[in-house]
Amino acid sequence: MAQVFTPLPSVPDHPALEEEILAWWEDHGTFERLREQNRDGKPWSFIDGPITANNPMGVHHAWGRALKDVFQRYRAQRGFDLRYQNGFDCQGLWVEVEVEKSLGLNSKREIEEYGLAEFAARCRERVAEYAGVITKQSKRLGMWMDWGADYMTFSDTNIEYIWRFLKECQRRDWLYKGHRSTEWCPRCGTSISQHELFAGEYKELEHPSLFVRFPLKGRDDEALVVWTTTPWTLPANVAAAVKPDAEYVLSDRGEWRARELAGDAEVVRTARGEELVGLEYEGPFDGLAAQDGVEHRVIPWDEVALDEGTGIVHIAPGAGGEDFELSRVHSLPVLAPIDEAGVFVSGYGPFEGLGTDEAAELIVEALREREILVEAGTIVHRYPTCWRCGTPLLFRVVDDWFISCDEIRQPMLDANADVAWTPPQYGKRMDDWLRNMGDWNISRKRYFGLPLPFYPCSCGQLNVIGSRVELEERATGGLDQLQELHRPWIDEVPIRCEACGEEVRRIPEVGDAWLDAGIVPFSTLGWENPERVEGGYGTGSARGLTTADLPDHSYWETWFPADWISEMREQIRLWFYSISFMGVTLAGRFPYKAVLTYEKLLDEHGREMHRSWGNAILADEAFDQMGGDIMRWMFCGQAPAQNLRFGYGPAKEIKRRLLTLWNSVGFLVTYANIAEWRPTWVAEPSSSHTLDRWLVARTQQLVSEAETAYERFWTPALTASFESYVDDLSNWYIRRSRRRFWNGEPEALETLWWSLVQAMRIVGPVMPFLPEHVWRNLVAGACPDAPDSVHLAGWPEVGEADGVLLEQVAEVRRVVELGRQARAQSGLKLRQPLRRLVVQGADGASPQAVEIAEELSVKEVEFGPVEASELRVKPNLPVLGPKLGKELAAVRGALESGRFEELDGGRFRVDGHDLGPDEVLVERHSKEGWAVASEEGLTVALDLALDPELELEGRARDLIHEVNGLRKEQGLELTDRIVLTLPEAQSELLAHEDWIKEETLAVKLAVDGGSSEPTIARAS
Ligand SMILES: [Zn+2]
Ligand SMILES: [Zn+2]
């Protein structure tokens, strides 16, 4: 008869096995069949946060993508209908920066020379290429999505939905153009919004540190001393700020500083800050044309810091955020020294045309020449850099477009109260962000992004276009060349002002990329769309790249809000924020009910991964070296509120633990094949054997724990439950049942088979490949009426676990564990049988005394008080001496002669005194001839006395062990029978002949006076 199950190799080759499964899924349409199977199920809505399609995915992306797949697979197992729509982020600064790099372009001027239409084409090509790469990688990770029907944020449909949102913002009077000082990336030539600033990195950078004199007018030989780390801002200085209530001192060198920061200078005079306010001084660069007519004066500012610098702050409103705010309060002139590339503009004399770093050297030189440089050094400090290109940020005063947050702040806070955050503390972080968020800066002075549909008119009207139809109605020309809504084509379509009828043009700015991703809960679900359009999402740049439909409004009603979303923690300020903002604006609520968020991925030593540090692991490399299952196990085993340490070390450890599972499957396969046993696809096994009943109960318990973990979106509980289950299955059930498998007992085979099969079902979402591989072997190959994939088998329906039995075996395992400790102390081999074990404190285990006896090789197990240990209590002299004084001697005598009473909590009553745990020294000794171990209320004692009978049995066990070693060495099959020949010296062992034969599969046992070692030969 052919073998029912395919024998397993000794270790699994995870990557190879996974490639096979992927091909099998592909060939058998497994995912499509799953979707079909659940088509009438209740909807469970997941909305994917888009991954940027401009590079291959990293292992940190794989973490999030694995979690998304885990919970989608789980819900599908429970029969829910899912959408499985993947999203790609396709436009905005990050795509532009990568394309610039690949084309060798270094500035906005070079992009314009290259041509916007060509540039847009290159951006689209890059997105198409990397959407393909990421799709392939995600499949390799085991992620099931509706690949090919992805949403792509650069589709015209997506853009139109954002236009509608912006028009709604205008209707509510939230849109405005702000003249502001903003963080600016001189390389990207655009402002950086508040949330992008948080996403960027603070780097340790070295900057100049200058102390500069500002001579006071009308006060000979007196000067303010200011401190700056940005010399390039000095040519734009217009004021100096002091803290009004701080004390300032004038040194004998004629320099004003705050007292705290004046060092040990000789003080000539003191003044409160407010007394200095209004004084005028000579600016450091009064000769520059840009400085014409500027009157430099001292202003008050409560925020002046007194922990570094001089307590007098140089103010340049055109080059600093707070400086700009102060200029409004104090009506200061605003000098904007640099252009969008960070280069000095005209009016700045020798600095014109220089970058800020280049200018800094000349500036220091000029200060020195004019003898107003007090001190020049350098400082290393944390400084913000561009989140896309890493360039240190500058401040510029520019016009940007904003959405006011004032009205929406409270409704957003209210809406957040309804969201279930995992882990819960992240909900509070969202609240913090919402309380502190500034107005949303939505404009970027760039090219390949959402075209902001703003057409301001000189009559004062701000025309905002809300759809393509509206654009076509109001256009005065250019529609024939409008191939898509991107620049440069959109810029060629002027419209008529709705107020005065004049022709007006679009502003050149594009939008913040978080608008693109934020609209997704509306644009992909067909919000307010009257009729479903097949393939209707693949418009504009997305045409030909996706088959996604544009659904109708009833679809939106079904799938909005999402039941669950998941992204990493930094998305609180980014995607979670933008979808929530748009959700509250358009639908009055957050577009999600529950969130799982997680921390950062580091290398296995806890350092950030950087390619330049040589510690980065590429996703493809991880797939090839570890395999998707191992990666996913690592991701899922991680508590999400802590950083994940990812690497080959942890992967090896996971492989080792999963090997126990593999070996258990291999064990079943081996003995089931020998017994020619065949499973049937049925309900729970009905064996009445205690071990079988226990494994069934243990499996039921696993299923229930797994359900709880998945329902709580808490995978670490699942991986922990599973690993503990596999340990029980292998190190208790199989250990204790070996003989039954050798005998081919169908009840044991059926129980182990059923249990492994259920375990594969519950772990399939976390680790989709290995369980499928096992399923193909154990189930699909053996039961024609069973589903051919574990992922089509649904969630196991199991009965209530027998809690009493589980508790009983848990106690038995504790007793056995302690018994092994006691044996280890005794120095006797486990193969040496002993007469007696006494167990105190685990009466629940008594029905299974036989199991304990066998495991520990003892003849009897008694449950009752252990008298084999001696309690010795001595006074702790340094403590007790001073306390008891003269009475110490009596107490010591009573303790020595055992006249004491043991109380709770380690206390003792002796001779009328109650002694605390710190007042005595307690020792427990095994009595002569016993080995005792105890732990948390459980004590076991092994009687170590040997007699000839026990000794002989011990020798017989040694022989069995040795012979089975020989069988292995000589490559015998598990079923091969042997002839065993013993040397004369071992002839006594014939007393155990039957037993030895049974244990070694010997058909004959002979004694040969000529040999000195036992020998075996295959029986013919
Ligand atoms: Zn940049
Ligand atoms: Zn007008």
Image (spheres, helix red, strand yellow):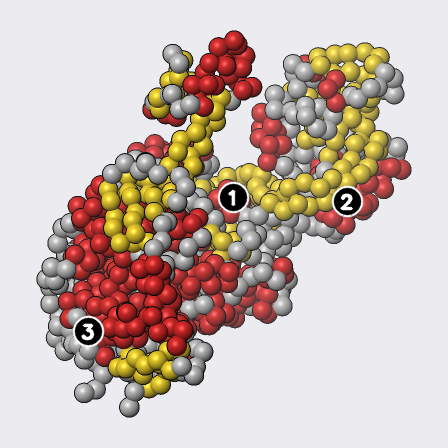
Whether residue 871 appears in this view of the structure is yes
Q: Nearer the viewer, residue 421 or 661?
A: 661
The percent position of residue 458, horizontal first and vertical second, equals 47, 44
Q: Which label lies toward us, 1 or 2?
A: 1
Crowd tier of the residue under label 3, counting other residues whose Cα lies within 10 Å: few below 14, some 14–19, many 20 or above: some
Q: In whole angstroms, how far apart are the C-alphas of marks 1 and 3? A: 64 Å
Circle 2/circle 3 CB separation < 8 Å:
no
The percent position of residue 381, horizontal first and vertical second, equals 68, 40
Residue type at tag 3 = Gly
Circle 1/circle 2 CB separation < 8 Å:
no
Q: Nearer the viewer, residue 1015 or 220?
A: 1015
- On the image, which quarter does residue 674 sit in? bottom left
The residue furthest top is: 886
Q: Nearer the viewer, residue 714 or 416?
A: 714
Residue type at tag 2 = Ala
Mark found first going from the N terminus, 1 or 2: 1
* Disc 1 element: helix
Question: Which residue is identified by label 1?
Answer: 198
Q: Which mark is residue 744?
A: 3
Residue in the picture at 16% in, 76% down: 678
The residue furthest bottom is: 1020
Crowd tier of the residue under label 1, counting other residues whose Cα lies within 10 Å: few below 14, some 14–19, many 20 or above: some
Whether residue 705 appears in this view of the structure is no
Residue in the picture at 77% in, 50% down: 358
The percent position of residue 9, horizontal first and vertical second, equals 37, 77
Question: Which residue is identified by label 2?
Answer: 360
